[in-house]
Image (cartoon, helix red, strand yellow):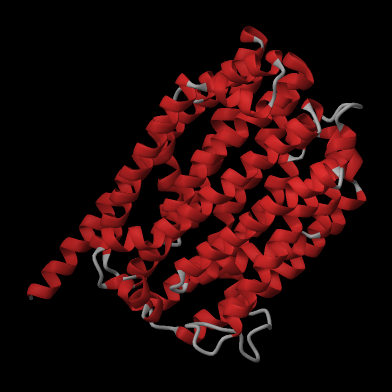
Amino acid sequence: MANSISKSPKALGTENVRSLLMTYSVPAIVAMIASSLYNVIDRIFIGQGVGELALAGLAITFPLMNLSIAFGAMIGAGGSTLVSIKMGQDDNEGATKVLGNVVMLNIIIGLVYMLGVLLFLDPILRLFGASDDTLQYARAFMIPILLGNVITHLYFGLNNVMRSSGYPQKARNATLLTVLVNLVLAPLFIFVMKWGITGAALATILAQSVSFVFVLRHFCKADSYIRFKKGIFTLDKNIVKGILSIGMSPFVINACGCLVVIVINLMLRKFGGDMAISAYGIINSVMMLFFMLILGLAQGMQPIAGFNFGAKQYDRVISVFKYTALYSTIVMSISFLICELLPEYIGMMFTDNEELIGISSRGMRILMMAAPTVGFGMVVGNFFQSIGKAGKAIFLSSTRQMLFLIPLLFALPPFFQLDGVWLSVPIADVLAFITAALMFYKQYKEFKKNIENKSVTTEN
């Protein structure tokens, strides 16, 4: 199956949908699990090798990391979705031009972001909640990350396009390579070289650079379905517009996530101090491990949904969504059980500080109360993005973050103190689930109508 798909992406429109989802999702899931496990292990290294304040400093950098991811996801997800749709329309030349525009946009945006943040790094970190004790750690981590920002953007953008153009296994291997190099370099730099949190950042950038070379080689090969050619590295107004309009959804999701983390950190500092921010760093690492599983499933869904939407095979579009939503709900239900039953053991992996373990355990139990509803909402948002309906995907993501979560973060803590910060998240998750269900049902009816009309036309 994997080989046939790599040789002929048109199999996306003919092969069994469930098998296709597994073929495309499993490599992405393996890569996501490996990447998430690395993040968890990396923070364990930082917590055990540098200390609790370093974990707090790392948590302070989350908004900047999210914003960088937002720009990278805008180009990567927008470009890969556009490639899938053009392949569904049998437009190989158009898909190749999208590849060139993905490269140029990542270089431009990566450089602008790097320079802009470096110029104002300390004030930004202060704004995000850094104290005198945590600023040095946040700064030491972000400087190497920012200097390697262009490489990061190019790697993630091209890896997305490689997956969508029929090479999910190669995309997985690139991510696994990043993880393996990271796992070797991080303990070496932190514990042996004594470079502390800066060593963790350097390990990340060097690992991504190695994988970037791997991905770059793929697009230089003559047998790749789409590859680098002369003349494709000129920005095309229509392609750029298509990439940005489709990619605006993941950008808004991550940009809103950036704002949410800023508010969370400020509220945690006000109602719990640096120790509460450190606890959030632990909780966020664990949550992301499960969320990455859902994103892996969504990445597997994306080329299938995009291709079949472009080919107007709406029954297959519906089918791939149903399987993805089901598997995502199962994953998040398992995460709910783990986080409710074993939070203390999870905390002890990161630190031996009993106060920090206690805060993170209680926070984890509250934050994950509505976890079984989260997978469906994430899949619906990614589904709309996959079929090019950026407006709906943006509405869903911004509603969950801006309309529900941020107001709750201001409303609940004055009454429930630190518990109010944690409690804001599951309430917002439930409200977002209801909104996503209503929006998908409306889209589902539209697909069913199109299928019925197509059937009538065929019979006539």
Can residue 69 be seen here?
Answer: yes
Note whether 312 is above or below 198 in the view shown. below
Is residue 436 something one can see in this rendering?
Answer: no
User: Looking at this view, is 139 or 91 the one in front?
Assistant: 139
Give whichever of 373, 459 is nearer the camera: 373
Front-lying residue, 69 or 327: 327
Quarter of the image that includes the C terminus: bottom left
Q: Position of residue 70 (x, y in %)?
A: 65, 52
Indicate the position of residue 298 as horizontal and vertical percent values.
43, 53
Say which quarter of the image contains residue 455. bottom left
- Residue 77 lies in quadrant: bottom right
Quadrant where the N terminus sits is bottom left
Residue 191: x and y in percent read 80, 41
Q: Name the quadrant containing residue 446.
A: bottom left
Asked whether, in this view, residue 321 is left or right of residue 216, the answer is left
Outermost residue on the left side: it is: 459
At 85% across and 54% down in the image, what residue appears?
116
Left or right of residue 159, residue 448 in this image: left
The residue that appears at 48% across and 30% down in the rendered structure is 429
